[in-house]
Amino acid sequence: MTYVMCIFMLGLVLGLTVVASNPSPYFGALGLVVVSGMGCGMLVGHGAPFLSLVLFLIYLGGMLVVFAYSAALAAEPYPETLGSRSVAFNFGGYLVGVVIGASFFWEGWYGGLWVTADELVEFSLTRADMGGVALMYSSGGMMLVLSGWVLLLTLFVVLEVCRGTSRGALRAV
């Protein structure tokens, strides 16, 4: 399990560097999908499969909307990929920065101390993520409705910003 979690963390870091180094929205969105998959895999490894599924579906739904807007606004016939020189240079620079930053915290790293929420099965009555979901719908119902309204308002704001003068997202064509 430790090797799988290390693979998830490595994929998370590599996906984040792809997102940070790529100026094209097409490949940046692909990097964000990889990052969300790896992050949800880490949640599954820590004992929260339901939370991971819900976050993955919500995140991919949001990414679909953001990708549609950014792809409509950026009408590039030949977008830059990871193989281009400038993107590969940025990617390498970000990886060097991550390695230097990780070297400061390498001494306190203990991968064997990962304990999931379901390790102590004989002492628990429910799964850890199921109790949180029930609490969210019982006590946090108004916050759920408020966050839904905020997301709807955000959608209208993004639509108004992307509309431009008269032709909307087709103004770049």
Image (cartoon, grey):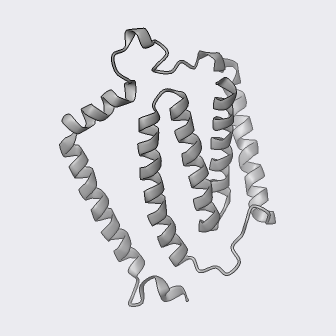
Residue 115 lies left or right of residue 132; in this view the side is: right
Decide: is 121 above or below 37: above
Residue 3 at x, y percent in the picture: 70, 27
The structure residue drawn at horizontal position 51% and vertical position 77%, both measured from the top left corner, is: 72
Residue 121 lies left or right of residue 137; in this view the side is: right
Residue 9 lies left or right of residue 148; in this view the side is: right
The structure residue drawn at horizontal position 52% and vertical position 77%, both measured from the top left corner, is: 73
Point out the image quarter for the C terminus.
bottom right
The structure residue drawn at horizontal position 71% and vertical position 78%, both measured from the top left corner, is: 78
Q: How many marks?
A: 0
Q: Is residue 110 visible?
A: no
Residue 23 at x, y percent in the picture: 64, 65
Decide: is 163 above or below 52: below
Point out the image quarter for the N terminus.
top right
The answer to which image quadrant residue 54 occupies is top left
* Residue occupying the far top of the picture: 122
The answer to which image quadrant residue 13 occupies is top right
The structure residue drawn at horizontal position 64% and vertical position 68%, both measured from the top left corner, is: 24
Residue 16 lies left or right of residue 91; in this view the side is: left
- In the image, 101 versus 60, the foreground residue is 60
Decide: is 90 above or below 66: above
Residue 90 at x, y percent in the picture: 73, 56
